[in-house]
Amino acid sequence: MSFIKLHWQGVEAYDLVLKKQNELHKLVSQGEEPMVIGCEHPTVITFGKRSNNFDDLLMPLSSLRAQNIEIFTVDRGGHATLHNLGQLVLYPIIPIKKLGIGVRQFVEMLEMTTAILLAEYGLEVGKTNEPGLWVENKKIAAFGIRIEKGVTMHGLALNVFNDLEPFKNIRQCGLTSISTNMELEMAKFMEVGFELNLEDLARRWVQIFEAQLKPLQSINNEVATADLSI
């Protein structure tokens, strides 16, 4: 039985999803089960704590305004990133302190879950020194989190069938890197006509991630039961 609830938002503005993150984070901090928000955003650029902010932009602000592209500075880790339609964005809200998970371990779980999902679609990915997943030298997934009161926020962005051209206008991970997506990579070995559904991918991601969390939840429940019996 699933214990992680997926809140699928479809296409939703970044600021509205950030507000929902804060609402669900409060609930999980008060003892609710882990949750994951899944969505896709209209084109938006966000700066993390390690960003050089506007120095990470490779296009003028006037161009952004002309395209109605919003910019947000947020309290997640990582550098600048870009979200747009066709990209799957997942925000796991997980009580890692309660589950006895360290920050590095949690990031590795996000990476592993995403790598397993991609492997199910025939895509092999690798890592560098920066959080993220790469197909050869092309970035396909980005990660950036925040921990408050032992509960996570923010998460990951997986390029599925989004337009990759806008990524040339920012420094991802502080670098001018090449991006790719699932559709482009799968087209190399799949027959024409395959379809990728973001909500289906989100639900499968949650299933894989949950499989990693369940043993930790069981251990936590056993410890809690033992404490009550003393």
Image: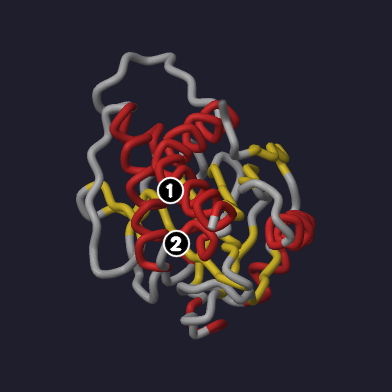
User: Which one is closest to the eye, mark 1 or mark 2?
Assistant: 1
Nearer-the-camera pick, 168 or 141: 141
Q: Earlier in the sequence, mark 1 or mark 2?
A: 2
Tell me residue 139's x, y (percent). 34, 54
The kind of residue on which mark 1 rests is: Ile
Q: Residue at x 64, y 54 (%)?
A: 43
Is disc 2 placed on a helix, strand or loop?
A: loop
The structure residue drawn at horizontal position 37% and vertical position 35%, both measured from the top left corner, is 117
* Secondary structure of residue under mark 1: helix
Q: Which residue is mark 2?
A: 100
Q: What residue lies at 69% left-to-right and 62% top-to-bottom?
A: 29
Measured as percent of width and height from the top left, residue 90 is found at 56, 48
Which residue: 37% across, 49% down?
140
- Inspect this view and state whether residue 14 appears: no
For residue 113, above or below residue 62: above
Which quarter of the figure has residue 131? bottom left
Task: State how the image is colored.
Answer: secondary structure
Circles 1 and 2 in contact, beta carbons < 8 Å: yes
Q: Quadrant of residue 28?
A: bottom right
The picture quadrant where one finds residue 116 is: top left
Q: Nearer the viewer, residue 43 or 104?
A: 104
Quadrant housing the N terminus:
top right
Front residue of 80 and 68? 80
Up the image or down, 125 lies above or below 1; here it is: below
Answer above or below: position of 30 versus 184.
below
Q: Which residue is mark 1?
A: 219
Q: Is residue 71 in view from this perspective?
A: yes
